[in-house]
Amino acid sequence: MDAALLRRALYRGSIAFAFLLMLAPVLTVVTISFFRQEIVSFPPEALTLRWYVNAWSQQEFARGFITSLEVAALATLIGVPLGTAAALALQRSGIRGKEALNALLLGPLAVPGVVAGTALYMFYLRAEFWLDRDITATLEGLVAAHVLLTIPWSVRLVSASLAGLDRSAEEAAANLGARPLTVFWRVTLPMMRPGIVAAALFSFIQSFENLELTLLLVGPGRTTLPVAMLSYLEFRMDPTLSAVATVQIVLVAALMLLTDRFVKLSRVV
Amino acid sequence: MAALILPAGLLVVALMVAPMLLLARISLNQFSPTEMMVEAMSAENYLRAVQDPYYRSVLLTTMAVALGCTLLCLVLGFPTAYWLARMQSRWKSLATILILFPLLVGNVVRSAGWIALLGNDGAINAALQGLHLTDAPLPLLYNAFAVVVGIVAVVLPYMILTLSAVIEGIPRQAEEAAANLGARPLTAFRRVVLPLAIPGVAAGSVLVFILCMNAYATPVLLGGPQFKMMAPAVYDQFVRGNNWPFGASLAFILLFVTMVLTLVGSALIGRRYRR
């Protein structure tokens, strides 16, 4: 009896501990963004919202936030259509070497960020020399790098949604005389919509919070939010940073809840 | 229709395959203080990385942290994965979102949270001193402990979600049959659930191990100046050292060691439970 009790306590205890480990840092960041004192200490002297104002008035955070939004939006706009097209080719065209092509397209997810990041940095420097123009620390350079995140995630999510589609509706449309393009436009595409929306939201989040791939590609005046936060945190942790982090947390949470309405998030990772 | 794959495929080749080939080529070049880099075909960067006691210890630290974090994740993640897999109420979706959420928030934000929790003025030390359990703050931050805690928290969601997807596929009847035949819960777990969950254990451990080996933000922010892991060491060569060939060779050593250990590890797990 005692053994059973102990076992149950251990089981529940480790579940609670796992959730604590995962959520405690996030909740702490949100909490201290409301503390009044400038040096983080517990308990709070009073609560305030002024760090949010302060965060926005700091150039590096405001600019970083805008750059991250731009990069994530553009990389999503490019990556999702290309990824969707590739997923269609992979799932529907009976293309040869399907496995290898799939591995290539998902490759950027398998290559560690450190390796891909440094490789891309060297490649950009070489390309700058050939083309005689700036690539690192430009919007184009960052977007090109982040397309490496949005393409594989789109291929993965759209492929998953295509694989689960019932083809009889498409066949019915074709039998009733619809031309292939009409079938695609009026039947297939609408059925793919949940997968595409999920791909867009997930791509956006992955791009917005990426650090490793971006780290060497930023420069003065063009930094993404995670990189700006990292360089700030290497020197100090204060409520201003928490406020910035909280904004990011709220943004991610909102996008996640939105995504969950279209696809079961447990199927995504 | 097959042509639809071209734009995405060409972009990945141009932005990932080509840069990695270039990086591999650069790793064979030589460093020169005056010209930065001299074209060469030599393995000296690799030899230096393997022979230099400093980089050897960085690599060993990285491997030890990655192995330890993977095992901790497995032990901590299994109960939660089992709980999630066997959950049937409408809360399951909420639990999944709660596990996935920290994953998407990003490492930098979570490291900030750990700094606020573990620091000398942090929440844990404030609580301990407030309760008069300790007189001076415990050194919880800027050491290996903080890095392990931080990394485990970062990768735990991956382990839980991978494991629980596999456990969900194990029929409940298998467990019930074991119980009906008189197996005690622990025996049933060890003889029925665990062997059937081995594909999940292998997949989760491999994924988590790779992420740990390549951890960047957590060791930089929580480890302090004395603590070095491979990924920050690679970036240092590019940002501070300007020794690109050496940095490139470090990157490939990290990639290679990770791959070898991953293969050995999954072979071992596979053989242990094949019978």
Image (cartoon, grey):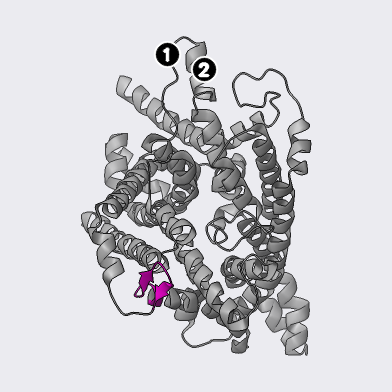
Q: Is residue B84 magenta?
A: no
The answer to whether residue A90 is seen in the rendering is no
Chain ID, mark 1: B
Q: Secondary structure at mark 1?
A: loop
- Under mark 2, the amino acid is Ala
Q: Which mark is residue B127?
A: 2
Between the residue at mark 2 and the residue at mark 1, the CA separation in whole angstroms equals 9 Å
The answer to whether residue A34 is seen in the rendering is yes
Locate residue A80, reporting x and y percent.
Answer: 67, 70
- Mark 1 is surrounded, within 10 Å at the Cα level, by few (under 14), some (14 to 19) or many (20 or more) other residues, namely few
Chain ID, mark 2: B
- Figure quadrant of the N terminus of chain A: top left
> Which residue is drawn at the image coordinates 26% and 54% (left, top)?
B56
- Reply above or below: A206 against A38: below
- Reply above or below: B149 against B28: above
- Reply above or below: A240 against A139: above
- Mark 2 is surrounded, within 10 Å at the Cα level, by few (under 14), some (14 to 19) or many (20 or more) other residues, namely some
> Which residue is drawn at the image coordinates 39% and 57% (left, top)?
B210
- Under mark 1, the amino acid is Thr
Locate residue A52, reporting x and y percent.
Answer: 75, 37
- Reply above or below: A262 against B125: below
Circle 1 sits on which residue? B134
Quarter assignment of residue B23: bottom left
Q: Which residues are the magenta region? A: B25-38
Q: Secondary structure at mark 2?
A: helix
Q: Is residue B34 magenta?
A: yes
* Left or right, B118 with reference to B188: right
> Which residue is drawn at the image coordinates 65% and 55% (left, top)?
A224
Locate residue A108, reporting x and y percent.
Answer: 51, 68
